[in-house]
Image (cartoon, helix red, strand yellow):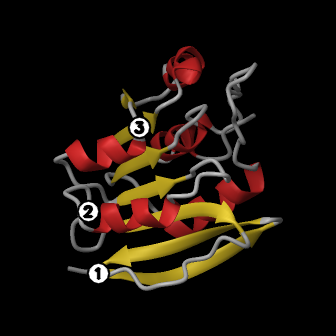
Amino acid sequence: MRITGGILAGRRVSVPHGDSEIRPSMDRMRESVFACLGDISSLSFLDIFTGSGIIALEAASRGASVVEAVEQDKLKRKILLENVSISPTRINCRFMPAELYVKRAKTSFDIIFMDPPFPYNFKWELVMNIASSAIVSNGSRILIHRPRPDYLKFEIPNLKKTDSREYGRSVVDFFLFIS
C-alpha cells in the first residue's frame, strides 16, 4: 500500500497480517477524500479505527499539524507504530476502543475520519457520540467510510451532511459540525 499525496507520496507502508481484520482504504478513495478536503496544512486530524495508519499518514504527509490515530486491535500495534515512524510530524497513537477514546478525549479536531470495520454495528451511534463530545468544535468536519447499504437513517443534532462520495461498494459521507 502506498501513500498517495504530500511529501511522503509514493512511500509504501505495511499492512498487518494474520487474524487481524483489516480493510485498507483504496488509493483512489484516499486521493479523492483528501482532494475534497483541500488544503489541510496546519489543521488537526483524528483517524479513528486507523488499522495500518494509512489515513493518518496521508494527513501528516499533506501537512496536518496534529495527527492522532486510534486503534483497538493490539495485533495491529507493531505494524502501525512502524508505519507512522516515517511521518514528518509525530502521529500520536492511542490503543483503545474508539468509544472509550471519544468519551475520554478533551481535545477537539478540525477533521475526524472514521473507518470502522464494515460489520461494526454501532457506527451511527458513535458518530452521534462524537457530535456531542469534546473532540468537535464549530466547523469540525467528520467523515465516515461505510458500506453503501449502511446509510444514516436519522438526523444527528449539530451535524450537517455536506457531501457523499461513492467508491465501488463503499461510500464516504462528509459532515460539518455546527454548534
Per the model, the C-alpha gap separating discs 3 and 2 is 18 Å
Q: Are marks 1 and 2 in contact (CB under 8 Å)?
A: yes
Measuring from the top left, give residue 158's x and y in whole percent.
29, 81
User: Given the image, on which type of amino acid does mark 1 rest?
Assistant: Asn
The residue indicated by pointer 1 is 158
> Is residue 27 placed above or below 168 in the rendered structure?
above
Residue drawn where x is 50% and y is 41% of the image? 56
On screen, residue 160 versus residue 132, left or right, reads: right
Measuring from the top left, give residue 176's x and y in whole percent.
38, 76
Q: First in sequence: mark 3 or mark 1?
A: 3
Where does the N terminus fall, quadrant-wise?
top right
The residue indicated by pointer 3 is 97
Between disc 3 and disc 2, the foreground one is 3
Answer with the quarter of the image where residue 100 lies: top left
Determine if residue 130 is in view: yes
- Picture disc at residue 89: none
Q: Do the residues labelled 3 and 1 touch (CB within 8 Å)?
A: no
Q: First in sequence: mark 1 or mark 2?
A: 2
Element under disc 2: loop
Measuring from the top left, give residue 160's x and y in whole percent.
40, 84
Element under disc 3: loop
Per the model, the C-alpha gap separating discs 1 and 2 is 10 Å
Per the model, the C-alpha gap separating discs 3 and 1 is 24 Å
> Is residue 166 placed above or below 4 in the rendered structure?
below
The residue indicated by pointer 2 is 136
Residue nearest the viewer, comparing 115 with 138: 115
Q: First in sequence: mark 3 or mark 2?
A: 3
